[in-house]
Amino acid sequence: MPEILVRNADVLVTMDGTRREIAGGDLLMRDGVIVAVGQGLTTSGMIVEARGCVVTPGLVNTHHHLYQTLTRVVPGGQDALLFGWLKTLYPIWARFGPEEMFVSARIGLAELALSGCTLTSDHLYLYPNGARLDDTIAAAQEVGLRFHPTRGAMSIGESAGGLPPDSLVEREAAILEDSIRVVDAFHDPREGAMVRVGLAPCSPFSVSRDLMREAAVLARDKGVMLHTHLAENDEDIAYSLAQFGCRPGQYAEDLGWTGPDVWHAHCVKLDGDEIGLFARSATGVAHCPCSNCRLGSGIAPVRAMRDAGVKVGLGVDGSASNDAGNLVAEARQALLLQRVARGADAMSAREALEIATLGGAKVLGRGDCGSLEPGKRADLAIWDMRGIEAAGAWDPVAALMLCGPTRVRDLFVEGRQVVRDGQMATLDLPRAIEQQNRLARRLAGL
Ligand SMILES: [Zn+2]
């Protein structure tokens, strides 16, 4: 792969140890790796002019359900709380198959790419009609994003006191067997990996305590990460107290679900003790501010988590509860939501950008991503600040969080161009959208 020099950025935001911002910044990449950042760099390879632009590390999305791009704004679920929302959507999701998983993931991944995301996880916890994790991995390979799919699962159906219909749950032995299959087939532990698999039983209210425990044992045996939903709203806390006789933090700790190899989505309702537990154990959090607003779940105590030293990344969450998948807009929402709770100095624009980049990389265990430094992977976003959104802005880095743009000009992942001049470089996007809409109409019975 030839060298690529990104040249003359108005500001190059490194997110390195000193949070250096380089005016007139250049970045040189070769073979998927950053080889230099600074000023006045040269190359005999390809040159990308970045005058008028801010260059940042690629944004990192730590929680998504890509398949849900096919069920955005479903009428019965638009105004419901979490449990009611799930019950509206489960029967629709039960009609998905491999094609729906592939097409919806491709749309969700492209949407993330256009909003500056270079690395995303995905939480796929239902496998109806022959759908497999493989379908979403194929989509990520086509789009070109770095991908951390998680093998999710539900095993307690309605007849056993769980929330999902019996048709969407799997036997626990089959879940563990398929988890081993996908880890062995796709997980790459090496630096620069494009695919890393995690294990992710859906939530405490849809799997058994045994499966949670066994998944943790299996994940450690295989050296992969663990992910689930935790403490999302008041109903979730009430369920935990009623069913398990303890709060979610205690439940997680008892089952081996804390540690540097674990990250939990939402954590809106964590109390002070649970925040302390997560900080001590280096357990990560995927903060999903838009979804928390959309479902009326509450405001996650991100300020308190960060102050205690908890690793926090951002998640757009599934597109049935956001229903956008724009990661840079999510960073803005994270900033605004902390300010609603804690005042105007609760989170700065630069801290929001840090959470969206370096913070997410730490949550996903990617020491090789999240900052623009020699030796790190060449994952970067180039934002054109000359458009109307930021016209008149005095501070281009803060403008990216507080004004826009909300769409990236160029995006590189592992040194490969995924977005060029605001368009997908890896994909016929209009055609992908047409396929997606056709499937959505079919699901709606139109
Ligand atoms: Zn979720």
Image: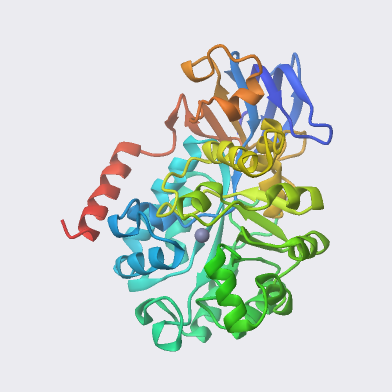
- Give the residue drawn at x 71%, y 68%: 223
Instruction: Give the color scheme: rainbow, by chain, secondary structure or one colour.
Output: rainbow
**Residue 2 percent across, percent down from the top left:** 61, 29
Q: Against 160, is 276 above or below? A: above
- Give the residue drawn at x 46%, y 55%: 295
- How many marks the image carries: the answer is 0
Query: Which quarter of the figure is the C terminus placed in?
Result: bottom left
Query: Which quarter of the figure is the N terminus placed in?
Result: top right
**Drawn side of residue 118 relative to residue 423, left or right:** right
**Residue 42 percent across, percent down from the top left:** 71, 16
- Give the residue drawn at x 47%, y 35%: 114
**Drawn side of residue 73 relative to residue 324, left or right:** left
- Front one among 14 and 414: 14
Q: Quick check: can you spot residue 414? A: no
**Residue 86 percent across, percent down from the top left:** 40, 66
Q: Based on the displayed image, in which of its 4 quarters is residue 117 positioned?
A: top right
Q: Against 270, is 306 above or below? A: above
- Front one among 173 and 259: 259
- Front one among 110 and 47: 110
**Residue 120 percent across, percent down from the top left:** 56, 50
Q: Against 50, is 80 above or below? A: below
Residue at the far top in the pictured view: 392
Q: Quick check: can you spot residue 241? A: yes
Q: Against 181, is 37 above or below? A: above
